């Protein structure tokens, strides 16, 4: 998911919405549906960050193994 593209679309949507006396239902629905996708992405990133922080504080082994495990978490 390209968050920067969605942010640009959101900024455009907000600017148009503030200047208009009516709501474009199609555009509003499109932006509302993206909220769910963004929340899923944030949850996934937050879970990965939690796992990485846990590893940093509890990992026993050499740094190469730690980096390999962090890479695995990021790819998942």
Image (cartoon, rainbow, N blue to C red):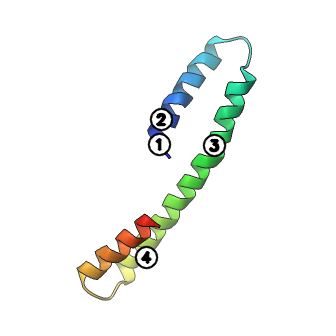
Find residue 35 and name its label: 3
Q: Is residue 47 above or below residue 8?
A: below
Secondary structure beneath label 3: helix
Looking at the image, how many numbered discs can be counted on the residues? 4
Front position among marks 4 and 1: 1
Q: Secondary structure at mark 1?
A: loop
Q: Are marks 2 and 1 in contact (CB under 8 Å)?
A: yes
Location of mark 4 (residue): 54
Mark 4 vs mark 2: which is more N-terminal? 2
Asked which quadrant contains residue 26, the reply is top right
Residue under label 2, please give it: 5
Q: Are marks 4 and 1 in contact (CB under 8 Å)?
A: no
Which quadrant would residue 12 be assigned to in this image?
top right
Q: CA distance from mark 3 to mark 4?
A: 28 Å
Q: Quick check: 73 above or below 46?
A: below
Q: Earlier in the sequence, mark 1 or mark 3?
A: 1
Q: Horizontal and vertical percent for residue 35?
A: 63, 43
Viewer-closest of 71 and 45:
71
Q: Which residue is mark 1?
A: 2
Residue 45 lies, in percent from the top left, at 49, 59
- Decide which of 40, 56 is in the foreground and name it: 40
Mark 1 nearby-residue class (10 Å; few <14, some 14–19, many ≥20) = few
Q: Position of residue 31 (x, y in %)?
A: 64, 34
């Amino acid at each position: 998911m390209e968050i920067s593209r969605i942010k640009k679309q959101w900024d455009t949507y907000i600017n148009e919405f503030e200047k208009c006396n009516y709501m474009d239902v199609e555009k509003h629905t499109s932006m509302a549906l993206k909220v769910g996708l963004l929340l899923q992405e944030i949850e996934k990133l937050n879970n990965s960050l939690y796992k990485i922080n846990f590893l940093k504080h509890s990992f026993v082994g050499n740094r190469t193994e730690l980096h390999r495990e962090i890479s695995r978490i990021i790819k998942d």
